[in-house]
Every structure is written in structure tokens, then in C-alpha cells.
Image (spheres, rainbow, N blue to C red):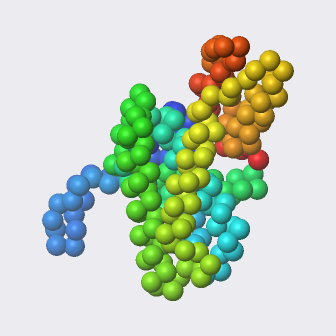
Amino acid sequence: MLTKLQELDVPCVEPAGIVQNRTDDTGNLLGAALLTRHLTFSLPYRALFSTTLRPQVAERFLDALALLLVRLHLSGFLWGDCSLSNTLFRRDAGSFAAYLVDAETGELHEKLTDGQRTHDIENARINIAGELLDLEAGGLLHPSIDPIETANSIINKYQSLWREVTEPVVVTPGERFKLYSRISRLNELGFDVAEMKAESNDGQVYLRPVVLEPNFYAK
């Protein structure tokens, strides 16, 4: 699955091999294990959401995870187990980028339905809140970070970004600036607009971005 996601230009770790015939300490046979290459300069969430993390920096991590989830859904990938534990973070062009680590529960479709996306983001909300509550219980979370509000914030960011990427722009004569403004915002979010679909109705033109390719190095 990771190989397919790489072909779709989705940020994820690189598979390196599979270990077969694993056994535990008592000799019981275990399932196969996937080996991935080390993602240089990346860190897990436990090393980031610490008591020393500044709230404004935490906001960047939330943006990165929301953006990763949007990219996956645009590619038709249903994660199934979106969580901080299954994500790595590293600096990218002055901000942060999120990378998918575990795709074992994922499914690749031609296009996701609204119901599939809703199921995925609700799972994400529950998982993220639980992970941050665990850090809080261990005294490892910055006191300014509320686990429930943070989980909700990531989902809200996802919803806003999804609308920005997929909803049409309504342009009337003399309002071409709206189109330029939308393209500029998408570029800032890390997307290249490769095509726009236009529909005309009652003198208005509806422009919808239909091909969006991730640009990992956008500032």
C-alpha cells in the first residue's frame, strides 16, 4: 500500500522490505512485518507534544496533519486508523510536514464518498484525543494544550481545507480576482492547480479545481 501511495505522490515513509516467519519469546509464530526506511530528521508526536512545546508551534503540527489527511482523501485513500502514532513530522520549508507511517488498515478507492471521509475523520478525532489524554495523564503534555479541543481543532482545519480545495469558485463578469485569489491560497497550502473545470449558469461561472497535485516544498 505504501508503494501505491508513493506513486500517487502522497507523503509517506518508504517501504524497504518484509520480515517473514517472526516468532515471539515463547516461539509462537507471528505475522509478517513491514520494514520502512528511516525518515531523516523526523520525529514522533511524543517527542513534539511535550511540556516544552509552544502553543504556536503545536498549531503548525495540527496544520500538517490536517493537510496530510486531505491529500490522502483526495487520492482516494481511506486511512482507517488516522492517529498521531501513525504519523511522523519534520520541518519542511519553514513549517512542518506530516508523513503517513502505518497504512495497514487503509483502503485505496477511485474516489471516497462523503460518508467514508466522515468515518475517517471521526476515527481521527477519537484517536488523537485519546493519545493526547494519555500524554496529559503522564504529565508530558504542555498545560496550554487541551486534548479534546486539539482533536476538534484538527478536524475543523481539515474541513476548512477540504472546502478550500474542492468547492467551486463563483465568478461573475469583472470578478476574475476571485479565481486568482483561490489559486493563490491553494498554492500557499501546498497544491498546484493543474486544471479548472468551468460551468456557466445565469451569467455566473462556476470554477472548480479538479486536478490538484501536492507540492511538498511550498512555503
Residue 48 position, x and y percent, is 59, 70
The N terminus, quarter of image: top left
Is residue 87 shown above or below 219? below
Q: Does residue 22 appear left or right of residue 179 in this picture?
A: left
Q: Does residue 16 appear left or right of residue 209 in this picture?
A: left
Residue 41 in sight here: no
Residue 108 in sight here: yes
Residue 180 position, x and y percent, is 79, 29
Determine which quarter of the picture holds residue 189.
top right
The mark total stands at 0
Residue sitting farthest toward the front: 202
Towards the viewer: 193 or 205? 205
Is residue 23 shown above or below 113? below
Write the residue at 69% across / 18% down.
Answer: 205
Determine which quarter of the picture holds residue 123.
bottom left
Residue 193 position, x and y percent, is 68, 28
Write the residue at 76% across / 47% down.
Answer: 219
Write the residue at 37% across / 48% down.
Answer: 119
Is residue 211 shown above or below 10? above
Residue 117 position, x and y percent, is 42, 42
Towards the viewer: 27 or 131? 131
Residue sitting farthest toward the bottom: 139
Write the residue at 45% across / 76% down.
Answer: 133
Q: Does residue 166 appear left or right of residue 173 in this picture?
A: left
